Image: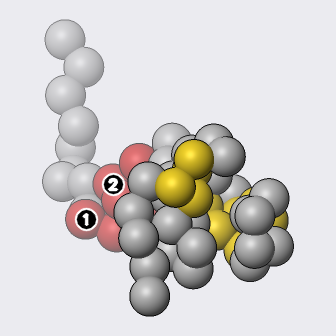
Amino acid sequence: MAVPKRKTSKSRRDKRRASNIKMTAVNVVECPQCHEPKLQHRVCKECGFYKDKEVISVQ
């Protein structure tokens, strides 16, 4: 049975595992109501609209 001769170091182990992690940038879109940048599928913080409906009131 194959047995490692030396202990795998933490840095070598972590370098191997790092290839599976993919970082993706957040998707920022323009609000159709106030034209401010906002995250997709979330209520606009500036005007409070989501899908052409006012969900929260913003002063």
Query: Tag 1, which secondary structure?
Result: helix
Q: Amino acid at mark 2?
A: Arg
At horizontal 24% and vertical 20% (from top left) the residue drawn is 2
Look at the numbered discs 1 and 2 and tell me whether their residues touch, using CB distance below 8 Å.
Answer: yes
Q: Quadrant of the C terminus?
A: bottom left
What is the x, y in percent for residue 16?
45, 50
Which residue position is annotated with label 1? 10
Q: Is residue 26 above or below residue 42?
A: below
Q: Which residue matches tag 2?
A: 13
Q: Classify mark 2: helix, strand or loop.
A: helix
> In the drawing, does residue 52 fall left or right of residue 22?
right
- The quarter of the picture where the N terminus appears is top left
* Image position of 14 (left or right of 19): left
Q: Residue at x 51, y 66 (%)?
A: 48
- Considering depth in this image, is 13 or 40 the residue closer to the camera? 40
What amino acid does circle 1 point to? Answer: Lys
